[in-house]
Amino acid sequence: MSTAASTVERPSRARIIADLQALLGDAGLLHLPEDLHPYECDGLSAYRQLPLAVALPETVEQVRAVLGYASRHAIPVVARGAGTGLSGGALPHTEGILLSLAKFNRILDIDPRNRTARVQPGVRNLAISEAAKPYGLYYAPDPSSQIACSIGGNVAENSGGVHCLKYGLTVHNLVELEILTIDGERLRIGNAAPDAPGYDLLALMTGSEGMLGVITEVTVKLLPIPERAQVILAAFDDVARAGHAVGAIIAAGIIPAGLEMMDRLAIRAAEDFVHAGYPEVEAILLCELDGTNEEVSEHISQVRRLLQTHGAVEVRTATDEAERARFWQGRKAAFPAVGRISPDYYCMDGTIPRSRLAEVLTRIGELSREYDLAVANVFHAGDGNLHPLILYDANNPGELERTEEFGGRILELCVEVGGTITGEHGVGMEKIDQMCVQFRPLELAQFHAIKAAFDPAGLLNPGKAVPTLHRCAEFGAMHVHQGQLPHPELERF
Amino acid sequence: MCDMTVELAERVRTAADSGMPLHLHGGNTKAFLGHPVRGEALSLHDHSGVLHYEPSELVITARAGTPLREIEDLLAAEGQMLAFEPPHYGDTATLGGTLAAGLSGPRRPWAGAARDFMLGCRLLNGRGEDLHFGGEVMKNVAGYDLSRLQVGAHGTLGVILEASLKVLPRPETEQTLVQERSEAEAIELMNDWGGDPLPLSGACYDGDHLYLRLSGAETAVKAASRKLGGEAHPDPDRFWRRLREQELSFFRHQAPLWRCAVAPASPPLGLDAAQLIDWGGGLRWLASRQPAERIRRQAAEAGGHATLYRHGDEATARFHPLPPPMLALHQRIKRSLDPQGILNPGRMYPEL
């Protein structure tokens, strides 16, 4: 906490609750322990913490009132959407208010002429495409959790999904945001035009993990639903060969709508779970092509040829919508499927240059033996985004710690080969130590300075996404000489 | 191929110490954009060279002073392109200037803008610190997106040293159709077809004719062209290049040239002006002597904003004014990267 915040006298817990009740009404505030428990974690259940209270505002004015109150009394605020995030980004602060935006769940406007949808932040990702469907339009970014995750959270985490290679991340599919700053200032970022005057704050807000402002409205871009989408399943008896096939497809000038890979353990878990009819091999690739009828026909035959010349032992093309759904079912259910074969699993999220895929998988295999923990690999092969799932049992003493260390080693490996510690899940609480691996102290200090431009007292989601330099020093990735940190003038929080 | 990082960092540090503003430039092809900067010239021109290009990874990394033409030639040799089709406005255009200006060409509504292709960059902030954000991979959400923030910031937030961009395959086939239309019809049609699953990659209206570019697999382009109808343009590459480079006869008007970015389906702006529409309706170029306030009001009512692009008088603000709280936030962001205010001060707004 910064000095600015710590000089403010903090009201008692009972006082805070009474004040918030006055702002939100009884129905708008949860504070009893049994009511707080459902909010103790997000999708990363390894970290749990109860907030001081959960605010459930219904109007932007109420959000503004809560932020104003928090700002005046230096109380941390953690915004939360559907809570499906996988990096602990919505983990509550024990001394803070958890600001749930669940009641902001209305689709405000679909503008088919301009191909945009204006929605509240609590609207589920998939609900946008469902509402746009009658106009022949859809919202492209499709995180695996799209049935449950909210668009506000997607913006906060810059979420991706299978479609990212061709259609981009959340940041590529936004038109306008309305945010409230910690001071309760209402700002519109972007506009209905293809660009907006001033700095690209739309890019800066996207993926900022709730650290810069609270999102109260989102306008997304809608795309025409492609005339046709078809998927190919290719089986390989060697993971590296599957990786080379991915490079070959892209080098041929084809950008698939989805290009996904699973390794043996993930295939087996998925097959046991949903019976998708997957072959028993070392790796399968799922390659979906979309576009006009003619284009898809042409690309399907090109991709089939490429897969065969790159060593696929079997290539199947889905012949109808039901078969296409079945091919995807296993991939989409891969995480819960792995959950069935292991008491616990830890999902990692790093990105690497595709050409290093074989090398990285080999190294993960070696680490798996070193830590004596099995790994199932599921990944967005087209864009190099890996999701190694480390299988463990939290009931075995020390196994969670070993798993976390192993996960950290995987992320460091991603950085070593020229990649990043997070492709789509965000840093949150989970990868905060690895930020010290990917970034140097000067860069982290610059992030803190940006944060301070929006939130000088450091009240929004404190302790997430960007580590303090002290933390990096403790993590061992930086050396603080005689207690001298770079930029002593910058506030640390 | 030359690495000037050390010298450039030294120059910025010296300027930060003395408070002497720097005027950043590359090939000087976009010097007309924005307000003139009073300061010592800091040329990025010699800091050049492609550092890394892996066609199968769809990524290229180059230093800021690398000629845009060199990058495009290199990509073309591998059947790839910068899909945002950046305007050059001259032979000496550089990568850094292209990104700092943040301009995109006719393909923008379908392929994305310059900022959409920025994967990462190395930059000097106003303290002369050498920082690296983003990277060379497609998906990266670690830390705030300070690389995309540089695109369109006109050098006011940092000196871009190197940038990594996503590239895309060039389409197998392209065809351009020409139809005679009224302005209202053209806007209507561009947005009708924009909502259909067609392989569109350009849609422009010059006041008489609607130009529609189709890109993709040959069979798909043929099928779409049968659906849309119109005359095939005899020299489409030249047409789209001249549109992008502002060489079409429309751009010879000597009246102030306004760039109005608006919601694409907005009806005709109804201003007394010669007009050319690009980006499927989203970009309206006006050659007009109407008062700036009037043009800005019309653009804002159409969901957008207006930039005075060329032939402006000194007194008129180039960029659309920001609301006071937004301007205050911009100032805080500027100070966080450039505390002494030495990087291109006043280029966008006097307060930045």
Image (cartoon, rainbow, N blue to C red):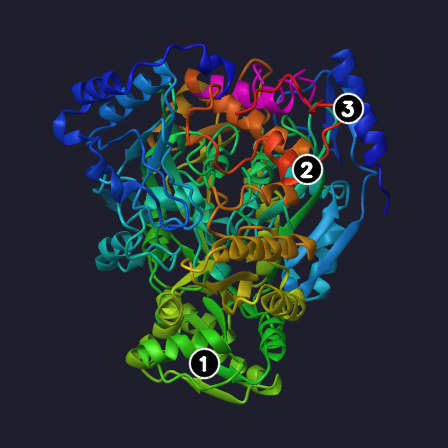
Find disc 3 in the rendering and name its residue: B12
Seen from the viewer's position, the closer of residues B140 and B180 is: B140
How far across and how far down the image is residue B216, in percent?
Answer: 51, 68
Please tell me whether residue A334 is drawn above or below residue A182 in the rendered image.
Answer: below
Q: Amino acid at mark 1?
A: Leu
Find disc 2 in the rendering and name its residue: A440
Q: Residue furthest bottom?
A: A313
- The label number, if any, that marks residue A233 in the structure image: 1
Observer-side mark, 1 or 2, equals 2
How far across and how far down the image is residue A123, in percent?
Answer: 26, 46
Q: Amino acid at mark 2?
A: Arg
How far across and how far down the image is residue A272, in percent?
Answer: 35, 80
In which quarter of the view is residue B40 placed?
top right
Seen from the viewer's position, the closer of residues B323 and B331 is: B331
A53 falls in the magenta region: no
Seen from the viewer's position, the closer of residues A51 and B138 is: A51
Q: CA distance from mark 3 to mark 2?
A: 20 Å
